[in-house]
Image (tube, rainbow, N blue to C red):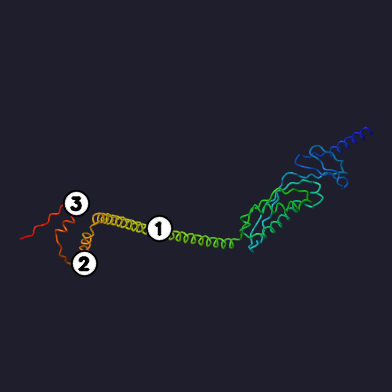
């Protein structure tokens, strides 16, 4: 009987010892409690706890995901839109994740939902739809600050949907189409104005060319007249020089020619001695003038 008792006792002790063996995987951490009080954090590998006195709660510390349920948010321009998203996080402090919050996963999802509505409410629908990265960053920063006591680290936030109800979407599409037509009409008017301005500039250039041509022609004609006047003046000067040279000391002959000039210019008749005129002209030109014989 005594031997059987000790055998049973030994088997019981072995079973009791094995019941206290706990294996923690690398993706987990264990929280050990003794008689309801925190004792320690179990690291990956072999761990042993005292059966019936201690217990272990394992917590996954890998990156996890929680959905932000689809909900309706009101934008800054009073437009209802349907939004949802995903929050990625991981547990850094397993003790805080167990003792500081009842259920860190549900708490995080609820906080992310209210934060998303608050951030969307500060933007117009167009701003929210065009700046999802800004929304993601703002929500991540807020959640990371608010969940410090949860023992979790918010890694990133991804907004999946920002949509309006179908009737609102149709109205917005009509507004966009009208805006596009307005832009197209403005561009067309600008093109017409540019073409008209180009034609006007071309006409101005053409008129300036004609004007410049007329100016050059007038300048050329004026130059020709000036050259002609200079040549005539030079010829007159040479004649005067020749006359002064010839009539120097012969004032009587010079006076006779001047009288003849004035008489001819007035279309008056003058009776002169042809011999004297021939003599004067012959001496000026150096050529012998033979008078015409009178007809019988």
Kindly report which numbered mark, 2 or 3, lies closer to the viewer in this rendering. 3
**Do residues under tags 3 and 1 come within 8 Å of each other at their CB atoms?**
no
User: Outermost residue, top direction?
Assistant: 3
Numbered circle sitting on residue 286: 3
Q: Quadrant of the N terminus?
A: top right
> Which badge, 3 or 1, comes first in the chain's sequence?
1
* Horizontal arrangement in the rendering, residue 30 relative to residue 296 (left or right): right
Q: Pointer 1: what residue? A: 205
Residues at marks 2 and 1, CA–CA distance in whole angstroms? 54 Å
Nearest to N terminus: mark 2 or mark 1:
1
Q: CA distance from mark 2 to mark 3?
A: 29 Å
Residue 277 horizontal side relative to residue 16, left or right: left
Give the mark nearest the N terminus, 2 or 3: 2
Task: Find numbered disc 2 in the image and state the secondary structure of the residue it sits on.
Answer: loop
The residue at the far right in this view is 2
Q: Residues within 10 Å of mark 2 (few under 14, many from 20)?
A: few
Left or right: residue 86 versus residue 36 is: left
Quarter of the image where the C terminus is located: bottom left
Q: Are marks 2 and 1 in contact (CB under 8 Å)?
A: no
Residue under label 2, please give it.
266
**Residue at 36% of width from left, 58% of height from top?**
215
The CA span between labels 3 and 1 is 62 Å
Q: Which of these two is toward me, 176 or 255?
A: 255
Callout 3: SS: loop
Residue 209 lies, in percent from the top left, at 37, 57
């Amino acid at each position: 009987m005594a031997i059987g008792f000790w055998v049973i006792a030994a088997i019981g002790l072995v079973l009791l010892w094995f019941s206290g063996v706990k294996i923690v995987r690398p993706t987990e951490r264990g929280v050990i409690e003794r008689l309801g009080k925190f004792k320690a954090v179990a690291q990956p590998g072999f761990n042993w706890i005292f059966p019936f006195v201690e217990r272990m709660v394992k917590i996954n510390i890998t990156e996890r995901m929680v959905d932000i349920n689809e909900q309706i948010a009101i934008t800054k321009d009073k437009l209802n839109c349907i939004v949802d998203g995903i929050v990625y996080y991981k547990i850094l402090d397993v003790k805080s994740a167990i003792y500081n919050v009842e259920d860190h996963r549900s708490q995080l999802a609820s906080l992310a939902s209210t934060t998303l509505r608050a951030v969307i409410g500060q933007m117009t629908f167009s701003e929210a739809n065009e700046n999802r990265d800004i929304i993601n960053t703002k929500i991540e920063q807020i959640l990371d600050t608010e969940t410090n006591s949860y023992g979790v680290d918010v890694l990133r936030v991804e907004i999946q949907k920002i949509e309006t109800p179908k009737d609102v979407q149709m109205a917005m599409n009509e507004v966009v189409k009208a805006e596009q037509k307005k832009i197209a009409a403005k561009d067309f008017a600008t093109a017409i104005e540019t073409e008209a301005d180009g034609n006007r500039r071309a006409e101005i250039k053409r008129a300036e060319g004609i004007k410049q041509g007329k100016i050059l022609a007038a300048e050329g004609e004026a130059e020709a007249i000036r050259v002609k006047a200079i040549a005539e003046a030079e010829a007159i000067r040479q004649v005067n020089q020749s006359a002064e040279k010839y009539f120097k000391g012969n004032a009587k002959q010079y006076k006779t020619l001047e009288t003849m000039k004035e008489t001819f210019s007035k279309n008056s008749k003058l009776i002169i001695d042809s011999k004297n005129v021939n003599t004067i002209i012959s001496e000026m030109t150096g050529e012998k003038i033979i008078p015409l014989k009178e007809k019988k």
